[in-house]
Image: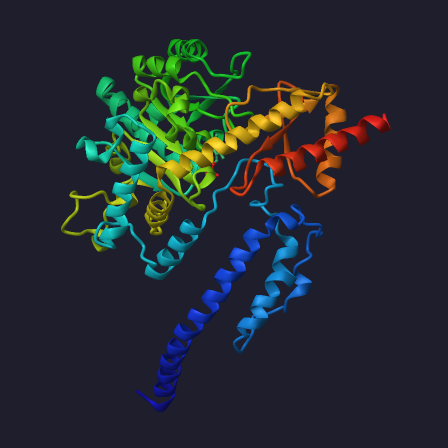
Amino acid sequence: MNSFCQKAHWKFRRMNEMEANQFREFGKEMIDYVAGYLENIRDRRVLPTVEPGYLRPLIPETAPEKPDKWEDIMKDIERVVMPGVTHWHSPRFHAYYPTANSYPAIVADILSGAIACIGFTWISSPACTELEVVMMDWLGKMLALPEPFLACSGGKGGGVIQGTASEATLVALLGAKARAICTGKAEHPEMSDADIVAKLVGYTSSQSHSSVERAGLLGGIKLRSLQPDDSNKLTGEILEKAVQEDIEAGLIPFYAVCTLGTTSSCTFDNLEEMGPVCNQYNIWLHIDAAYAGSAFICPEYRYLMKGIERADSFNFNPHKWLLINFDCSAMWLKDPSWLVNAFNVDPLYLKHEQQGSAPDYRHWQIPLGRRFRALKIWFVLRLYGIENLQAHIRKQIAMAHHFEALVRSDERFEITQEVTMGLVCFRLTGSNEMNEQFLKRLNGKGVIHLVPSKIRDTYFLRLAICSKQTEMSDIDVSWKEVKETADEILAKK
Ligand SMILES: *Cc1c(COP(=O)(O)O)cnc(C)c1O
């Protein structure tokens, strides 16, 4: 080593030692900051008031040549970051759907960050794969998923943690495509892969999440968006009619998505009817229960997943409603071999001797790299126990019903969809324009935050119970805001 190298070498070694000590100190300080932030989040304005481009002038134009001080970075959290944060974990945040957050999951993520493995094969970090296999069985049992989905059943089935529900929908579609090509070729040996793919057609509801349509685009197949029935549910009859039309037109139906808890209004497609149709026509049935799936840990809500045994794949987001921080989307497949075979490329540097004895999860997903996400499932399930997680779901649903009752008690309003989970869809009785004005004014005050939706030309507001910290008294605050804003809007008229 020349002396320059030697010096750099020692400098780095010293830096590593110093960093470890500083990490202990800074880490503790950050944990205090995080706990304080979440404890007092109610007091912050839920929506920021900044204008686009607010941030650039607040920080230097280039990265620092010499290290900055930790204290300065801590100060910049409140100066630079917080003014531009939408506080998703404020009890005043009612937009979209919840995104999960809990201390056990945050702590597990610290550990995952420290291990920082990339668990694409079993040998790349056996604990990463093996804990995931077992956690997906734990979760599957909590939801009472049928045995064929679970790895512990000894069959082909098993679970995998995807980054998002969107990825799960795409992965299921690609598995279905591989299966359809395989059966298509067995029945018509004269047809090429491309001939078959050109004939494939899948089905979804016009009420399903935008990621479903996107999966069709990314997967390069035709996906029909079917009009659901009057109560916004996709039914067996609607599906079968479309399937028969397509068969008559010489197409090959191969994939259908059933949504349990739509994003717009938390409506449940008729799974019990869709299942037999899919089975009869050899259509891969994927269930997207991104939000509502968490509720199936409570036996009293499992009636909403009746018929699940007929599905090929099932997905829900613990990162929405089960207190496990993003990203954690749980997916189960009855026969993952369709994916494994479709996605299998095996360069020498990824081969290992234990191949086949445990899943190599790289074949179950789009990317190669994957974080150690099973840790946060493990920590959350152990530190809360099933009991407290059920209590969380039940409490949030009860609060939605509380808000529903308040809305119903005021005749100026109407409830537009049956409330089953933690979402209340409502509107002022009157025109869409008036409701648009109403929401604009409501959000403009910055006390609470909601987003709208529209079904069949009826514009409505969605109030989702999002924060883990939400109490009945918070719902009363939100209702007071809604009511007072309605007073103002109606007085103006
Ligand atoms: C939220 C949601 C999604 C998208 O979830 P990601 O994990 O962000 O991809 C998909 N489907 C439904 C029904 C949803 O509510």
Point out residue 369 in the picture as x, y percentages from the top left corner.
Answer: 34, 51
Residue name at image x 37 percent, y 25 percent: 299
Residue name at image x 44 percent, y 73 percent: 22
Kindly indicate the quadrant of the structure image that contains residue 405.
Answer: top right
Point out residue 188 in the picture as x, y percentages from the top left corner.
Answer: 25, 18
Q: Nearer the viewer, residue 400 or 328?
A: 400
Which residue is situated farthest in the left direction here?
Answer: 353
* Screen quadrant of the C terminus: top right
Q: Nearer the viewer, residue 149 or 282?
A: 149
Which residue is situated farthest in the bottom direction here?
Answer: 3
Point out residue 475 in the picture as x, y percentages from the top left corner.
Answer: 62, 35
Q: Is residue 155 left or right of residue 306?
A: left
Q: How many marks?
A: 0
Residue name at image x 35 percent, y 35 percent: 331
The answer to whether residue 264 is visible is: no
Vertical placement of residue 87 versus 303, above or below? below
Vertical placement of residue 297 versus 364, above or below? above
Vertical placement of residue 53 versus 487, above or below? below
The answer to whether residue 330 is visible is: yes
Q: Nearer the viewer, residue 364 or 145?
A: 145
Kindly indicate the quadrant of the structure image that contains residue 118.
Answer: bottom left
Point out residue 363 in the picture as x, y percentages from the top left corner.
Answer: 28, 42
* Screen quadrant of the N terminus: bottom left
Q: Nearer the viewer, residue 300 or 261?
A: 300
Q: Is residue 393 left or right of residue 418?
A: left
